Image (cartoon, rainbow, N blue to C red):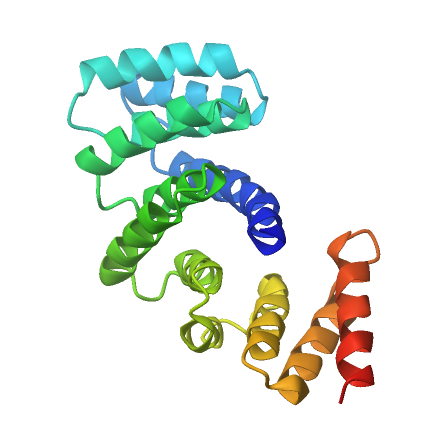
Amino acid sequence: MQEKRLIIIFILSIIIGVGIIFVIQNKGFIIGENNEKREYLRALNLIEEKKWKQAEDILMKLSNKNTEEGKYDFHIGNIKRNTNDYSNALIFYEKALKKSSDIKEIYNNLAGIYMVQGEMEKALEIVNEGLKLYPQYEELTFKKGQLLFTFQRYKESIETLEKIVSKDRYFEVYRFMGLSYYYLQDKQNAITNLKEYLAKVNDEIKEKTEIEKLILQIEENQ
């Protein structure tokens, strides 16, 4: 239960980050276009300014006008998530996915909301769907490794996370790999990965103390 809680805390920051990245990526394609796209740009700017209600109103109008376009629902989902309205975030992400399965970030954010709500099986299903289309998408690979860990499929979790272990932004990978090795009774690899995690994490991360205690426990029992 403790590890599931830590996963959820970390996942929330990932969802926010993906939303911001998607906003920035879209801006370059709409400057100087028609009125509809100018309104879209205006909504994205309002999101960056955290003017959620104004942005949502514009996006809802655009969504109602363009019923086959999922990007508007995707951004509304991001707004709902940023205002902690997870149930409605889920609804809009699901709508976005049905309309625009080519937006890979939808899979990531939708899986993240399922994880927050404790629906890990649904989250893994969405992650696997996304990875079939985008096998190199690192955010989904990271989520898959975490989910496999929660299902106690430790060997598969390690195999999945090893694909992104060299990426600096995924320092949390070392914690999940270390704990997986620990539960597999591979104490040496557990210590190696957990120490690597400690070397990369800053002192403000509250899980750091827990990992330090675990390493001492493992070393004492060797």
**Quarter-wise, where is residue 159 in the image?**
bottom left
Q: Nearer the viewer, residue 194 or 74?
A: 194
Would you say 32 lies left or right of 97 here? right
Quadrant of the frame with the C terminus: bottom right
Residue 176 in the image: state x and y as whole percent: 58, 67
Residue 124 in the image: state x and y as whole percent: 34, 54
Q: Residue furthest left?
A: 68
Residue displayed at 36% across by 48% down:
123
Q: Nearer the viewer, residue 53 or 181?
A: 181
Residue displayed at 57% across by 75% down:
183
In the rendered view, tell whether residue 48 sits above or below residue 220.
above
Would you say 77 lies left or right of 210 here? left
Residue displayed at 81% across by 68% down:
212
Q: How many marks?
A: 0
Q: Nearer the viewer, residue 175 or 56?
A: 175
Q: Nearer the viewer, residue 89 or 190?
A: 190
Residue 13 in the image: state x and y as whole percent: 58, 43
Residue 110 in the image: state x and y as whole percent: 37, 40
Would you say 147 lies left or right of 66 here? right
In the rendered view, tell whether residue 16 sits above or below residue 108.
above
**Quarter-wise, where is residue 216 in the image?**
bottom right
In the rendered view, tell whether residue 204 sits above or below residue 67.
below
Q: Residue furthest front?
A: 221
